Amino acid sequence: MKYLTGNSAQDVAALKKLCPAQDVLTFPFAAEGGIAFVALYADAVTDKELLGSLVVRPLLHYTGEADAQEIGKRLAFPECKRERALNALAAELLSGNPVLLAEGVREGLVLGAKKVFVRAVAEPPTDVAIKGPREGFIEDVKVNTALVRKRFKTEELRIEMVEVGRRSKTSVALCYLAGTAKEEVAREVKARLSAIDIDALPDSSYLTHFLAERPRSLLKQVGTTEKPDIFCAKLAEGRVGILADGSPIALTVPYLIIEDFQSSEDYFVPSYRATFTRILRLVALIVAIYLPAFYIAAQLFKLQLLPIKLLLTIAGSIRGIPLSPSLEMLVVLVTLEILNEASIRMPKYVGMALSVVGALVLGETAVSAGFVSTPAIIIIAFSGIGLYAVPNLIEQTSVIRLAMLLVAGSVGTYGIILATAFLLFYLVTAESFSSPIAAPFSPLVRSDLKDAFFKYDLRSLDCRPRAIGSKNKRRLRHE
């Protein structure tokens, strides 16, 4: 490892060799005492105004000794540290922190004058709440940790930084409450993060593949959220949270599937209302997955499943349709997925026109032309709406719906039952950091059922979820 020599010209040349980019600039200046200084900084990511006002201007009148410690005292810069290794100085320089060198001094000063480009803290578009906090995470990890620190004014909050990515060197914050979270889980998460060997980390979703015990599993094994209040509530239950620089999506482990049926608003409304909405989400999801499959199975194999009046209506609607029931439903489903994907990717000002074209032109024209039937469009439209009742599971449930549709068209009702049994077996055997994701139903944890689909009042939720294995069991003490 190479170190500074105290010769400014040689040290600048060595740093420029390690940082050959053209936006790495130098600014030489001299103090009244005769000491020659050189400030190196990355033009695009350094706050030059801060560098000039808090560093250059005070040192122009410096008459003290050529010593890094004395120079640092004169600056009184809030973020200032000494460093001798050239590699460490180059890394700080590329991160946006300017480096100050003085002639005859073998230590450089790293100054925290990084320019941070952040958007305002606002409500996340994917998790809108009528009641409750409106803040959402942004793409800066320091701001996100500050939002967490604002909610936990306790010495038990631990925030450990891990660097991920050989070239991006992305800062990842590991957050947990000491004495509440399982230390084994925190150590395991940190070990898995440290073992990641990847060029760059563009988003926190990359981390889920390395944190999951079964990366190719259809089911989620890592929880996600964009709201600090939800993130902190999960930390308070004993979970471990991960914040990645450059991503507004926070991760939490262990993950339980019941989390995605809960909403932050459930804790700001009466318990009966929260229970109703949770059951409604479950029913909507089940109907969205199974309605197209049972419709196909009824047409092909078991007409007795349909009431006689409904059967007559459907028979009149599908008369003259050239496609088989299963192929017809598959075509409508694929069309809906294409429209959904296009509406997300297209510019916002085209989205309304796309909705009109998809709903009116394509749908009405396809029915009028006798290409598809009206019941097929109604069922797929209702199924598509029902999936968004639980938006955090949309990727998994859309695939399950398609699989159920294919099974129903091939085998019928028995195929749906067998596929459901396989899905339940797959669900009850999945784990997230030694916690069953199907808890508190499998295994049955009676105390955790108070905050499952039936939500009890706040005074009844006096213990943390036992399925997570928190060290501190009680979170509310009655007088």
Image: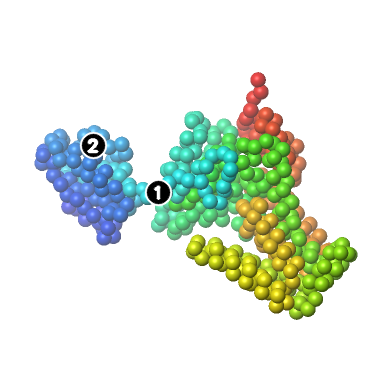
Q: How is the image coloured?
A: rainbow
Amino acid of disc 1: Val
Q: CA distance from mark 1 to mark 2?
A: 27 Å
Q: Nearer the viewer, residue 2 or 230?
A: 230
Q: Nearer the viewer, residue 191 or 328?
A: 328
> Could you tell me how many numbered marks the image carries?
2
Local secondary structure at mark 1: loop
Residue 460 position, x and y percent, is 70, 30
Residue 372 position, x and y percent, is 72, 73
Q: Residue furthest top?
A: 479
The image quarter containing residue 332 is: bottom right
Question: Compared with residue 187, is residue 477 higher up or lower down, i.e. above or below?
Answer: above
The answer to whether any part of residue 267 appears in the image is: yes
The answer to whether any part of residue 162 appears in the image is: no
Residue at mark 1? 118
Amino acid of disc 2: Leu
Relative placement, left or right, of 213 versus 382 is: left
Residue 75, numbered circle: 2
N-terminal of the two: label 1 or label 2? 2
Residue at image position (64%, 48%) is 260
Residue at image position (66%, 52%) is 389
Relative placement, left or right, of 431 versus 171 is: right
Question: Compared with residue 261, is residue 151 higher up or lower down, i.e. above or below?
Answer: above
Q: Nearer the viewer, residue 153 or 185?
A: 153
Local secondary structure at mark 2: helix
Relative placement, left or right, of 107 versus 324 is: left
Residue 31 position, x and y percent, is 13, 41
Mark 1: few, some, or many residues within 10 Å (few <14, many ≥20)? few
